[in-house]
Image: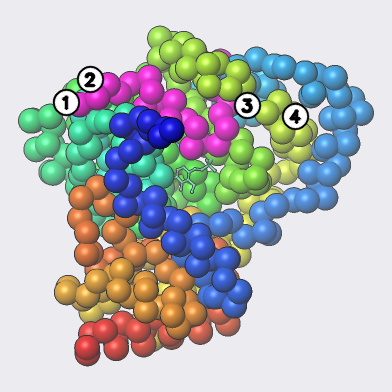
Amino acid sequence: MQIQISKRMSKPDFQGEFVDAMLKAATAPDLISFGGGLPNPISFPVEDIEAAVNKVLQENGVQALQYSSTAGYGPLRSFIAKRYARFGVTLSADDIIITNGSQQALDMLSAVLVDPGDEVLVERPSYLAALQTFHLYDPEVLTVGLTESGADCDELEELLKHHSPKFFYAIPNFQNPTGLTYSKEVRERVATLVASTNMLMVEDNPYGELRFRGEGGESFGRYLGEQCCMLGTFSKTVSPGMRIGWIACPNRALMEKLLGYKQVMDLHTNIFCQMVLAQYLQDNDLDAHMTKIKNLYQHQADVMMDCIARYMPEGVRYTKPEGGMFIWATMPDGLSAVEVQNEAVKRGVLVTAGDPFYEKDRGVATMRLNYSNCTDEKIEQGIQILAQVIRDLLQA
Ligand code: PMP
């Protein structure tokens, strides 16, 4: 018997192989990893979560172990809604759906909005797993380039004259993979351009709370109201393992469809975890917790930027993030980041070549460097090795 796999899952999937290779390499002992995007364990408040688990079981054990509502646990939805005030948006608990990580939110939006052949718009480069998700729904994926201050607005304006994407998926704060952030001017201009169309703005903001320098970060919801869905997650602030993310969706009609789809997918997100998280957030000061994480990431980012400046050959450019977990390096033209990645792994350093973050471009000279999970010594050692790899390949 030969099992007939759907066309959807039979498409050649270059990016899947890429991730597999990276994950395998990441488990090798002694490897210096700038490759993944794992939060530092400093962000996991193990003892406080233990206390929250005990309290939930003692005080509300039956509710925590029973089926629950699709939209999610009320107190957690309220906490999330209130926190949007700091990003300039007024929301209520009714606007929030708790999802199984923001990854599920990407799938829900695609399922509800995209028919085969529809256009969707993403940044160039963009988050690899979002691209993979969108592709399952057979859209035409359009891209808009990024500048140091966010989406290239001239390119966006020109593109919108000829295309009608269903949505624009953007990561405006400390983007994955580039670490870039939209300036206020760019946010306003993008919002004006989006407002002149029927497309939905999908703002994915997993890193927004990780600003360690500078200011800003208003949500697109502030400018676009119902025309904007905001995705968020506790993965980078409390725990990725708990798989608690959300969609903030002020548009009622869209909200209903999202809830309908989620109900079919999984009925609801793990209520036990939702209640534990809500209890943790009630009993602890998330801002104080975030300060510890941000101080560490700022230090690690500074060490990495300093080492890049010191050791990399001339012609290597890099972004200077004000938050988040990533630096994006651009090497001299002609160099292949995949070759750099392969050679660096042989010498004990893992990086992520830029290729899978692009919709079409391959053989690019860009790569993503993650700094959130390394000691100062490892960062220095790893960047020295990487610089030597680049030097060697430039001379080859
Ligand atoms: N969006 C972006 C831009 C991300 O970087 C990530 C995590 N790497 C996610 C979404 C998914 O996060 P989670 O499902 O853990 O909430």
Task: Please identify the quarter of the rendering in which residue 143 is found.
Answer: top left
Residue behind mark 4: 272
Question: Residue, x 50% and y 60% (percent of image)?
Answer: 23
Real-space CA distance between mark 2 and mark 4, rounded to the nearest whole angstrom: 38 Å
Q: Which structural element holds mark 2?
A: loop
Q: Which structural element holds mark 1?
A: loop
- Mark 1 is surrounded, within 10 Å at the Cα level, by few (under 14), some (14 to 19) or many (20 or more) other residues, namely some
Of tags 2 and 4, the one toward the viewer is: 4
Q: Is residue 26 above or below residue 55?
A: below
Q: Are marks 3 and 1 in contact (CB under 8 Å)?
A: no
Residue behind mark 1: 164
Question: Residue, x 41% and y 44% (percent of image)?
Answer: 129
- Mark 4 is surrounded, within 10 Å at the Cα level, by few (under 14), some (14 to 19) or many (20 or more) other residues, namely many
Quarter in which the C terminus is drawn: bottom left
Seen from the viewer's position, the closer of residues 148 and 43 is 43
Residue behind mark 3: 269
Q: Is mark 3 within 8 Å of ligand 1?
A: no
| Residue type at tag 4 | Phe
- Residue furthest to the front in view is 1
* Residue 108 located within the stretch drawn in magenta: yes
Q: Are marks 2 and 4 in contact (CB under 8 Å)?
A: no
Q: Is residue 386 left or right of residue 276?
A: left
Q: Earlier in the sequence, mark 1 or mark 4?
A: 1
Residue behind mark 2: 198
Q: Which residues are magenta?
A: 94-117
Inspect this view and state whether residue 82 appears: no
Real-space CA distance between mark 4 and mark 3, rounded to the nearest whole angstrom: 9 Å
Real-space CA distance between mark 3 and mark 1, rounded to the nearest whole angstrom: 33 Å
